Amino acid sequence: MVADFDPTAYGASGIAEEYDDLYDAHWETDAAVDLVAELAGGGRVLELGIGTGRLALPLLDRGIEVHGIEGSPEMVAKLHDKPGGERIPVVVGDFAHADAGQGFSLVLLAVNTIFALPDQRAQVECFRNAARHLGPSGRFVIEAWVPDVGAFRANRLVRPRIMGAERMSIESVELDPVEQMMRTTQAVFSNGSVRLYPANHRYAWPAELDLMAQLAGFQREDRWADWSRCAFTADSRAHVTVYRL
């Protein structure tokens, strides 16, 4: 049994210290920044779950005003320690409810962060909170994976995440199909040590996210398989979806 965890303590687990090293090379940062900058149209951007600033800092370098909401003070500290990071205002709190102001052109929720919220109600509230922050015709952009429950056997899965000469990681996942929850623990091996990072994911299929969006007053504008605008098909394992007020 994978233990429950407190999502507000995610950064306190120690992962904030090596978050960039673990993940930066595995994400489409340049393409994501290009698309977000285009969709924002020169307006202000609010990133929910801003983390250590992987997307926020390049957007700032393009002259875009960026704000954030983040649940982990440790992740915010890492962001503000980076060059330019101190110029990004961040509210520390639950991004389903926290208030960072109004009149944004675009709200961004990248890398499956919508699934960090504990249940469907919180995810619906996140859509509503995004709508409250946006100006007229504002956009809410979500990046998420498409759940692959067929990969599980007896509701359990063990898979490699990172394979390298200096660092590797293995993830164990327990599936609860009733609650649509994946309870995970990532074991990271490097420098002769092992570190365990738990996380929960309340997953949702794209059609469910579309309904949440409608409840918050959004309409789906576009959906692609990735940040490069490849077509979303039945075989796509992830999606980038744009909702608009």
Image: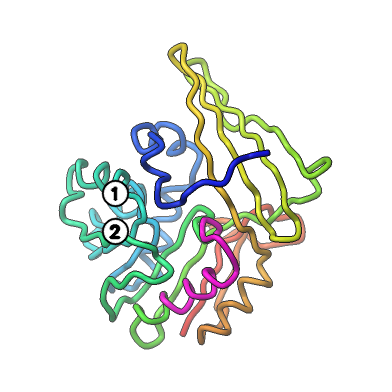
Q: Look at the picture and state if 201 lies above or below 41.
A: above
Q: Which residue is drawn at 26% across and 46% down?
A: 79
Residue 73 circle label: 1
Q: Quadrant of the N terminus?
A: top right
| Residue denoted by label 2 | 92
Instruction: Please state the horizontal and vertical placement of residue 217, each as a whole percent of the image.
Output: 51, 87
Q: Residue 213 lies in what quarter of the image?
A: bottom right
Q: Which residue is drawn at 31% across and 68% down?
A: 45
Q: How far apart are marks 1 and 2 (CA)?
A: 6 Å
State the residue in front, 163 or 74. Answer: 74
Callout 2 secondary element:
strand
Q: Are marks 1 and 2 in contact (CB under 8 Å)?
A: yes
Q: What residue type is labelled 2?
A: Val
> Could you classify mark 1 by the number of other residues whose Cα lies within 10 Å: few (under 14), some (14-19), or many (20 or more)?
many
> Is 52 part of what is drawn in magenta?
no
Q: Which residue lies furthest to the top in this view?
A: 192
**Above or below, 129 relative to 20:** below
Horizontal and vertical percent for residue 225? 62, 58
Vertical placement of 110 versus 214: above or below?
A: above
- Please tell me in which quadrant of the rendered image residue 139 appears: bottom left
State which tag comes first along the sequence, 1 or 2.
1
Amino acid under disc 1: Pro
In the image, 130 versus 107, the foreground residue is: 130
